[in-house]
C-alpha cells in the first residue's frame, strides 16, 4: 500500500467508503494514534505503526453545476487521481490535463497542492469537505482556508492529522486555455506533429514526458521527488553562480528564486549512487530516492539526511523533504 514498496505493519487497519463509516470507526476507536492513507505515493514508512490506519476509499464523480464555460465537479477522496483526470478529459473538462499520471488519490491532492508542468491544483480548486476527527463533524474549506503554497497546505501544517478529506470540488473549463509554455510540453507536442492541441493531446504529451523521466513505482519503489525545490534569495543564487554559471533557476514569489534540487544533488555527486544493490538515488533523476529491493524506510531516511547535509555544505542551500515520514 505504499509506492516505496517498504514493508511495515499497522496495529489496526480499516477502510472507509462513506461518512457513516468514519463515524462508526471513530466511535469505537478512542486513541489519538491515527493515520489516513490514500494511495501511499507520498509516504516513507520508517517503522511499524502503533495505531489505526484508515484507508480512504470514498468514491464518486459528479458534475454538480455547469454553464457554457465552466463545470464544478465533485470527486470522492478515494478516486485515483489519474483516473479522475481521464474522466475530466472524457467529459471535455479542462484544467487538470497537465497533472496527468500523478500517482495517488484525489483526497491527497490538496494536502501538498500537487503540481506539475506549470499547473497546481490550487488553480482549479473550488472547495473540499473534510471530517474533523475531534469535533466529529464535516467542515467545508475554500481555497483561502486551505492556505495553498508550493507543495504546501494547511493540512500539512497547522491542521496536520486533524481532518479526513472526504470530497474535493474543482472548477473546470469547457472552453480551454491550455498551458503548454513549459518547454518539455512544447517539444513533445512538436514531436507528436500537433499544432493545435486539445486537452487530450496535452495530457498525452505530459504522460510521455513523465514516463521518460520518472521511475515507475511498479518497477522501482519510489515516492516521486523526495525533496522540494528550494526557494532562496537572489544573493545566494549569485554566490552559487560565481562557481556554476549553468545553475537552473526560476522566479519565485517575494523576489526570490527557485533552484532545482535535482541539479544540486547531481552536482554534489549523489546521482545514481546505490547502496548494497537495495536503495539509492535514481540514476536518471537525482531528486528521486529509490528502493530497488527490500530496503528499510530508515535506510532511505538516513540517506536523505546525508544528502541534505552535503548539499548544505557544498551550496549553503537547505533542502526540505517533500515526502511524509511516518
Ligand atoms: P498518500 O501518500 O497516501 O498520503 C500523503 C499524505 O496525505 C499523508 O500525510 C496522508 O496522511 C495524507 N492524506 C492522504 N489522503 C488523505 C485524506 N483523504 N485526508 C487527509 N489526509 C490524507 N506530486 C506532485 O505534486 N507532483 C508530481 O509531479 C508528482 N509526481 C510523482 C511521481 C511519482 C512516481 C510518485 C510515486 C509520486 C509523485 N508525486 C507527485 C507525489 C504524490 O503522487 C502526491 O503527493 C499524491 O498527492 C499523494 O497521494 P496519495 O493518495 O498517494 O497520498
Ligand atoms: N535536473 C538535474 N539533474 C537531475 C534532475 C533534474 O540537473 O538529476 C535539472 C533538470 O535538468 C532541470 C531541473 O533540474 O533543469 C528541473 O528538473 P525537472 O524539470 O525534471 O523537474 P524537477 O524539479 O526534478 C519538478 C517537480 C515534479 C514535477 C516536475 C514537472 C518538485 C519537487 N518536483 O521536478 O514533481 O513532476 O517538476 O513539473 O517540485 C513530485 O513532487 O513528486 C514531482 C515529481
Image (cartoon, rainbow, N blue to C red):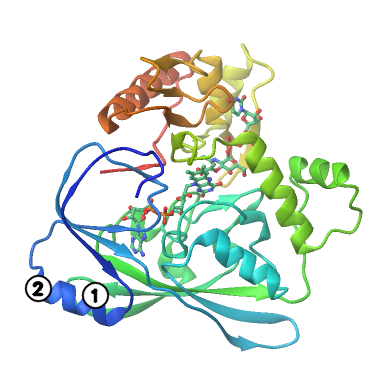
* Residue at 39% from the left image edge and 42% from the top image edge: 323
Q: Is residue 303 above or below residue 180?
A: above
Spatial distance from mark 2 to mark 1, Cα to Cα? 10 Å
Q: Quick check: is the Cβ at mark 2 less than 8 Å away from ligand 1?
A: no
Identify the element where label 1 is drawn.
helix
Q: Report crowding for label 1: few under 14, some 14 to 19, many 20 or more residues within 10 A (C-alpha).
A: many
Image-quadrant location for residue 326: top left
Using the image as rendered, state which of residue 7 and residue 261 is in the foreground.
Answer: 7
Q: Report crowding for label 2: few under 14, some 14 to 19, many 20 or more residues within 10 A (C-alpha).
A: few
The percent position of residue 231, horizontal first and vertical second, equals 51, 37
Badge number at residue 284: none
Identify the element where label 2 is drawn.
helix
Image-quadrant location for residue 44: top left
The count of marks equals: 2
Q: Is residue 150 above or below residue 24?
A: above
Direction from residue 114 to residue 13 in the image, left or right: left
Using the image as rendered, state which of residue 123 and residue 283 is in the foreground.
Answer: 283
The percent position of residue 49, horizontal first and vertical second, equals 17, 47
The percent position of residue 255, horizontal first and vertical second, equals 59, 41
The residue that label 1 is drawn on is 22
The residue that label 2 is drawn on is 28
The reply to whether residue 227 is visible in this rendering is: no
* Residue at 37% from the left image edge and 50% from the top image edge: 40
The reply to whether residue 68 is visible in this rendering is: yes
* Residue at 10% from the left image edge and 68% from the top image edge: 29
Image-quadrant location for residue 197: bottom right
Q: Is residue 141 above or below residue 318?
A: below
Amino acid at each position: 500500500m505504499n509506492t516505496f514498496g517498504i514493508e511495515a505493519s499497522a496495529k489496526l487497519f480499516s477502510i472507509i467508503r462513506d461518512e457513516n463509516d468514519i463515524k462508526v470507526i471513530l466511535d469505537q476507536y478512542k486513541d489519538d494514534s491515527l493515520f489516513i492513507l490514500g494511495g501511499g505515493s507520498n509516504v516513507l514508512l520508517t517503522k511499524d505503526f502503533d495505531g489505526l490506519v484508515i484507508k480512504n476509499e470514498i468514491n464518486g464523480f459528479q458534475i454538480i453545476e455547469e454553464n457554457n464555460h465552466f463545470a464544478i465537479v465533485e470527486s470522492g477522496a478515494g478516486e485515483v487521481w489519474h483516473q479522475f483526470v481521464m474522466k475530466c478529459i472524457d467529459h471535455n473538462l479542462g484544467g487538470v490535463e497537465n497533472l496527468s499520471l500523478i500517482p495517488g488519490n484525489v483526497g491527497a491532492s490538496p494536502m501538498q497542492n500537487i503540481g506539475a508542468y506549470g499547473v497546481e491544483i490550487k488553480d482549479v480548486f473550488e472547495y473540499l469537505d473534510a471530517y474533523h476527527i475531534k469535533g466529529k463533524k464535516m467542515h467545508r474549506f475554500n481555497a483561502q482556508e486551505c492556505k495553498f503554497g508550493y507543495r504546501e497546505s494547511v493540512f500539512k501544517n497547522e491542521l496536520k492529522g486533524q481532518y479526513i478529506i472526504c470530497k474535493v470540488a474543482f472548477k473546470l473549463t469547457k472552453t480551454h486555455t491550455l498551458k503548454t509554455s513549459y518547454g518539455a510540453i512544447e517539444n513533445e507536442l512538436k514531436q507528436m506533429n500537433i499544432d493545435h492541441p486539445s486537452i487530450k493531446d496535452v495530457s498525452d504529451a505530459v504522460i510521455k514526458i513523465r514516463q521518460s523521466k520518472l521511475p515507475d513505482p511498479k518497477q522501482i519503489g519510489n515516492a516521486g521527488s523526495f525533496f522540494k525545490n528550494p526557494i532562496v534569495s537572489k544573493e545566494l543564487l549569485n554566490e552559487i553562480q560565481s562557481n556554476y554559471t549553468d545553475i537552473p533557476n526560476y522566479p519565485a514569489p517575494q523576489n526570490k528564486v527557485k533552484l532545482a534540487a535535482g541539479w544540486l544533488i547531481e552536482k554534489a555527486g549523489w546521482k545514481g549512487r546505490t547502496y548494497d544493490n537495495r536503495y539509492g538515488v535514481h540514476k536518471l533523476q537525482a531528486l528521486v530516492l529509490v528502493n530497488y529491493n527490500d530496503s528499510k524506510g530508515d535506510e532511505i531516511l538516513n540517506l536523505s539526511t546525508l544528502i541534505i547535509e552535503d548539499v548544505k555544505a557544498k551550496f549553503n542551500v537547505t533542502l526540505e523533504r517533500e515526502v511524509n515520514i511516518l
